[in-house]
Amino acid sequence: MTKLRMMRVNKGLLQIFLALLLVGTIMFVSNYLVYKNSLSGIYNQVSENNKLVVKNMIRVFDDSFKDINELIYAIQLLPYNAWEAEGEGALSMPDAYMTYTNIRLLLSPIEYIEEVIVYHPSSDLAITAAGTIRLSELIRNAYGNSTYSADYWKLQANAKHPLRVYPAGWYEDSGQFGGMRQKLIPVLGSNQTSNMNVLIFLNNEKLMQHVNQQAMMQGTSLIVMDQDRNIVLNTEDNWDLVDMLGELSSGTKPEETLTNKDYEYNLFKSDYNGFLYINKSPYRFANMEAVTEVNRNIMAVAIACAIVLSVLLSFYLYRPVRSIVKLVGLRDQREAGADYRIIRTGIAKIQEENVLIKSQMDVFLAEMRKSAFYSALLDDSPSRETELRMQQYFAEFYKEPSFVLAVIDLRRIGERGQAESMRLEEKAKRLENGLRLALRRSVCVFPMTGRRLVAVIGLADGASRDAAVRQLSSFATKAQPDWLGEDTAEAAVCCVSRLYVSEAGNVHKAYREAEDGFLYRNVHLDRPVIDVQTIRYTWRVHVPLYDIEKAAHYLVTGNETECCRMLSDIFACNAEKEIHYHQLVPVAKTMFYRMLKLMETGEAETSEIIALEADFNRKLQYSYRQEDIQKALIGAVKFIASKANHGPKSKLDAASVAQYIEQHYSENLHLDHMAEKLETTPKYFSNYFKKTFGINFVEYVNKVRLSHAKEMLKHTDLPVADIGEKTGYLNSSTFTSTFKKYYGISPSEYRRNKQTDPVPLQKAKQ
């Protein structure tokens, strides 16, 4: 039994050892392959890159020489010849000054030019970028050189010659800076077409920076030779070219390569001026054999260490592996050795449990975040505990110094009761993701009761608020189907608060402000986003009680079209005044209940009246625009009209009475006459009329007569007395006194001011 257990233990150790050894072997093989392929590959890549760098330097060299040649040519073409104007040896100062000014302008964009000297063979005076000076004094003090003195440059000026580039050399400045040496490259311009000689000194260091010498591979050198194969520039002082030039061709090829000992020479010929550029680079990395030997020793040591480490780790990891087997709950297989399939199964089980626990923790943290936010949202004076909970569970709220609150109401469209494809929580998550992408800001969205969402948008400062509102408006217009769903029966309306500091105490204030924004929104605007900062507050509500009464009169008399027109005019007038939503609703209810009163005397059942009232109020609750409120009222009016005109009418009903008065108002109407026509008593008719119409019979007749009288005063030229007679008044004085009693002005005054409709002052008494 003991022997069998030892065999199982040895099997477990062997499995661990072989696994570790396999890992070490794979690492060794991969390192060896990288080592073998990297040395030659790295060098080849570096060498090719260096050739590209040198070619780019040659192009920059050619461009630089082109710029210098064009500079010399431009100076010689200047219309100012300071020496010819004044005769031999003399200098015209105005021309000299203009030449000096143009030299400075031409020289300014070229940084690697140290100095430009313009001189004449017949004069010792020269013009430079710093002014006029004697050539001998300038060369001696600023550009001293044992080979190229002032006499040398004067001698060159006496003979015709093309452009020449001289070798780089050291020149000493013994003047202002005393003993300073700098490496310069002289360039003497051609004087074959002009007697002005132009000498340019190039700063060697700045020129090499201009051509980007530092990009060359380390250990490489460069020689620049002119068309006569004279060395102009050499970056390596101890470079012997004798053997190398002997093996190269005559330089007729545009590009040539030569390998000699440990170096590779690349020759390039310029297409512009025939200059030769020779690049010297190492044929292989230095100390390559030593590096190779060191790498071999390192790999041998790594192999030995991998074997020893595998043995040690096998014993070290055996007990932890057995503990893992026990931990994953596979005790029935723990005696089977360190089988990695058992371990893998157990680890997968633990991972699944960890994922489940993590998802549960995420749900818990999300609920705690919502709870902390709701506490701050609903409490008008949050406690210190609420602030701490916000900081702990809703840390995103404090990432930005300020915030705005957007309240999104989901209003129903289409048939009520349609099944929704998404829960409110899912819509909140979709909206949150969409707003984060659209606004590129910190956004958190929380679901509320009553089909409402609340979005918290973090902002850096007040300037970013307007941009965020514009982005939110664009998102609300274009992306609603994405987060509401294509088959939804809802549309989103949003109200954005002002900017608040990110504190828990401001959440409730922002929420109340956004809620009030829904009530104070201007009903004539149909926008998906309401900005509380742009709301124009007004209290100019138009509630024309006389017109409402007149519309009810039209409805009683069966003129449904005219009644609806007058109600629509009241809506249009309020829209022009830009009143708020919460102001328009009571106006609509006032008109509705005045019309609903007519059903009390009709044939409608009480249940029908209750159903109509409930339906109207429900439509008002879900309405958002003025058109929705108006449509609900017009629909209710049409229903009332259908009930008022339905079936055979008795003589004593409101519609018949109103219709008779409308048709016979010009006659001598009185209670006895009406009672006789309706086959009832005057007292009963009087009580019935006041209960039905809300006013007594005489006042109602006067209103009908005066309404027609106003129309005649506005649209006819009949005398006042005739109008009074036609509207049922016995004489002109009675008509005038009654008109003035109701409207405060006489009929004549009304005719003169007929553009303004008078408002009734008071009800006439019987």
Image (spheres, rainbow, N blue to C red):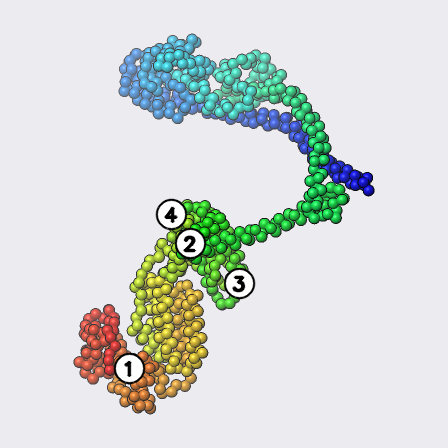
The residues tagged by marks 4 and 3 sit, at their Cα atoms, a distance apart of 38 Å
Q: Mark 1 points at which residue?
A: 696
SS assignment at label 2: loop
The residues tagged by marks 1 and 3 sit, at their Cα atoms, a distance apart of 54 Å
Residue 715 visible, this angle: no
Image quadrant in which you'd find residue 88: top left
The residues tagged by marks 1 and 2 sit, at their Cα atoms, a distance apart of 59 Å
SS assignment at label 3: loop
Q: In this rendering, would 408 be left or right of 357?
A: left
Q: Nearer the viewer, mark 1 or mark 2?
A: 2
| 202 or 493, nearer to the observer | 493
SS assignment at label 4: loop
What crowding class fits label 1: few (fewer than 14 Cα within 10 Å), some (14-19), or many (20 or more)?
some
Residue flagged by tag 4: what amino acid is it? Gly
Residue 187 is situated, as x and y percent measured from the top left of the image, at 42, 17
Q: Name the residue under label 3.
A: 420
Q: Which mark is residue 382?
A: 2
Name the quarter where the C terminus is drawn.
Answer: bottom left
Residue flagged by tag 2: what amino acid is it? Pro
Residue at (67, 27) in percent of width and height: 36
Q: In this rendering, would 114 be left or right of 243?
A: left
Q: Name the residue under label 4.
A: 462
Number of marks drawn: 4
**Cβ atoms under marks 4 and 2 closer than 8 Å:** no
